[in-house]
Image (spheres, rainbow, N blue to C red):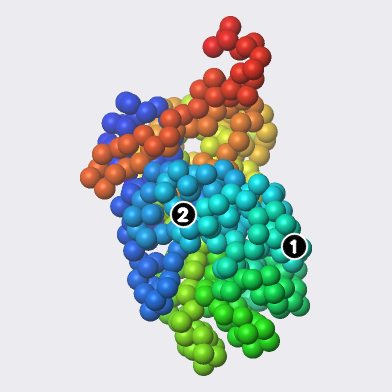
Amino acid sequence: MKKPFVTLEQLKEITKTYPTPFHIYDEKGIRENARKLKQAFAWNKGFKEYFAVKATPNPFILNILKEEGCGLDCASLTELLLAEACGFTGEDIMFSSNVTPAEEYQKARKLDAIINLDDYTHIDFLERVAGIPETICCRYNPGGIFKTANGIMDNPGDAKYGFTKDQIIEGFKRLMGKGARYFGIHAFLASNTATNDYYPELAGILFRLAAEIKDKTGAEFKFINLSGGVGIPYRPEDDPNDILAIGEGVRRAYEDILTPAGMGDVAIYTELGRYMLAPYGHLVATALHEKHIYKEYIGLDASAVNLMRPAMYGAYHHITVMGKEDAPCDHKYDITGSLCENNDKFAIDRMLPRIDIGDLIVIHDTGAHGFSMGYNYNGKLKSAELLLREDGSVQLIRRAETPADYFATFDFTGIFDKVL
Ligand SMILES: *Cc1c(COP(=O)(O)O)cnc(C)c1O
């Protein structure tokens, strides 16, 4: 059973000040989880997690992770600005972008961020627009199908990212010729993985590649970046990943491959997003309407604007009807938002307790790729974000949008002054 990190009593109190819908994050859970990740990789002296900003781009959350020793993984100008505003600079920023505009490379260079090149052609582009830094990383795409002992994980051959193997070896030579001195490699081969084998298998591929590149080019490796992709148990029956077992698996690959290659001082980096935040966020909504036609519907005051994953990927998000945790799940509902889009459903044919109008609904695991994926379809506004502090108090960490925010890009016209 999945249990919310807030109680009905807490939510009743919170909604007196902050109306639903809102996202709420659990500071205690975030910190404990970040410490466990650090512990899992404590065997590696240079280990660092670069939190994938796109998962939860809120400065208050980023500051918590900063206090836990994390850096940031950015992929756009605004994400770099967010990092800068939060006081991240230099090697605490990984810039893992693709299809990168010149101004973004220039900003990354100004911040002295570590640049992770997505493509061979970006070597000359970066040199032209911002210069080649001393430390640089290249993203690898092995192509084909990525298989592990437990089956197929994903299809890198169809992914737009990264260098081929020949390109990465040639790329290292070119970069060395242009003055780069310290190197990293990176790959992201599967998303939301539900096995402890993903990182160790990926590490094996990257460690062997690094040893080969070093052998062929003499490049000095500073780090290997395992990127994101460690999953979380969205369904109550899913087995959670064991981060300590994952760290141990990577350590074995390191000792089997890197240490004998004379690369026992290479740092391991990660760029986890989902694993760091998803379980520590809830979308809280209120049941607004019920509807009885060919199916039974419950309409919420939240919509895909607040959480797009179900509409976009058919993703499962667990739902708790607050105060009815022990009631039998004897009603079959579609739980919907209000968008004029029939995919605006948080759940389809979900067995839940009987829902009454006004019930508070917790949608689980929205802490990563939740609020941040949101959009403004139908002119629906983005919600507030709240932080449940370790001391039990609640802090507003982003206010809800207002119509003035939605119309802000017409501020040069003045035509909305009359209605606002
Ligand atoms: C999205 C992304 C991540 C984070 O992925 P998760 O699945 O949230 O762990 C890390 N690195 C890069 C380059 C990404 O695009």
- Give the quadrant of residue 397: top left
Q: Secondary structure at mark 1?
A: helix
Q: Quadrant of the N terminus?
A: bottom left
Nearer the observer, 205 or 17? 205
108 is higher (above) or lower (below) than 260:
above
Local packing at callout 1 (Cα closer than 10 Å; few below 14, some 14-19, many 20+) is some
User: What type is the residue that disc 1 sits on?
Assistant: Asp
Residue 182: x percent and y percent?
56, 74
Left-right relation of 134 to 326 = right
Q: Residue at x 38, y 54 (%)?
A: 66
Query: Which of the two residues, 185 or 149, is positioned nearer the viewer here?
Result: 185
Q: Residue furthest bottom?
A: 260
Name the image quarter holding residue 347. top right
The answer to whether residue 192 of the structure is visible from this angle is: no
The tag earlier along the polypeptide, 2 or 1, is 2
Residue ID for mark 1:
124
User: Can you say whether 224 is above or below 90 in the image?
Assistant: below
Which residue is painted at 51% across and 90% down in the image?
262
Label 2 belongs to which residue? 89
Q: Residue 354 bears which disc, if any?
A: none
| 220 with respect to 364 (left or right) | right
SS at mark 2 in the image: loop
Of residues 310 and 295, the one drawn nearer to the viewer in this rendering: 310
Which residue appears at 48% of the width and 58% of the height?
Answer: 90
**What is the C-alpha distance between the residues marked 2 and 1?**
25 Å
Residue 123 location in percent, x, y? 71, 64
Q: Disc 2 beta carbon < 8 A from ligand 1?
A: no
Residue at the spot x=55%, y=28% of the render?
Answer: 381
For the C terminus, the quadrant is top right
Q: Is residue 390 left or right of residue 164?
A: left
